[in-house]
Image (cartoon, rainbow, N blue to C red):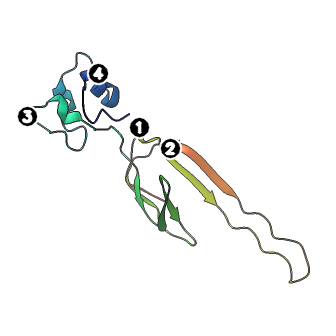
Amino acid sequence: MTTPASGEISIQDIVDEFGGTAPHALSEYYGVASGVPGSGELTLSDFYGRSNVVYFAATGGTITTVGDYKVHTFTSSGTFTVTTAGNAASGGLEYIVVAGGGGSGQEAVGGGGGAGGYLTATGLILSAPVTQ
């Protein structure tokens, strides 16, 4: 859960978002998120609205956005490359792969084609780069 964007913020809020080991010192959190300094003086306000979430990023296929999801659609052979691996805080990677079905018999004669197969999984955590 992202740290508060304003108002009171505590070291415990930072620990809850980014982890760490006791005893806690702000210096253990240098550069843990965009906008948090990598050295020098840190203040609690440096952590306003910061999050430990790293989202997955990938290339390949035709990419569309559906709600909170990036969808990579392949209608022929192609390469899917994970460029940013994300982390457990992002909820992990979800995928569904749908295979095409078989054709039917002759026109106006014969039965329908066979169904295609599918694979699915949720919550996957990968290391970048990954190419499939």
Q: Which residue is mark 2?
A: 124
Left or right of 64 on screen, residue 106: right
Q: Earlier in the sequence, mark 1 or mark 2?
A: 1
Q: Secondary structure at mark 2?
A: strand
Q: Which residue is mark 3?
A: 40
Picture residue at 53% right of the left edge, 49% below the top: 94
In the rendered structure, are the residues bearing label 1 and label 4 in contact, judged by CB atoms less than 8 Å apart? no
Amino acid found under the numbered disc labelled 4 = Gln
Q: CA distance from mark 3 to mark 2?
A: 36 Å
Q: Earlier in the sequence, mark 3 or mark 2?
A: 3
Given this view, does label 1 or label 2 mark the residue nearer the observer? 1
Given this view, does label 2 or label 4 mark the residue nearer the observer? 4
Q: CA distance from mark 1 to mark 3?
A: 27 Å
Q: Earlier in the sequence, mark 3 or mark 4?
A: 4
Q: Which residue is mark 4?
A: 12
In the rendered structure, are the residues bearing label 3 and label 4 in contact, judged by CB atoms less than 8 Å apart? no
Amino acid found under the numbered disc labelled 3 = Gly
Q: CA distance from mark 1 to mark 2?
A: 12 Å
Amino acid found under the numbered disc labelled 1 = Ala
Q: Secondary structure at mark 1?
A: helix
| Quarter of the picture holding the N terminus | top left
Q: Is residue 51 above or below residue 44?
A: below
Q: Which residue is mark 1?
A: 89
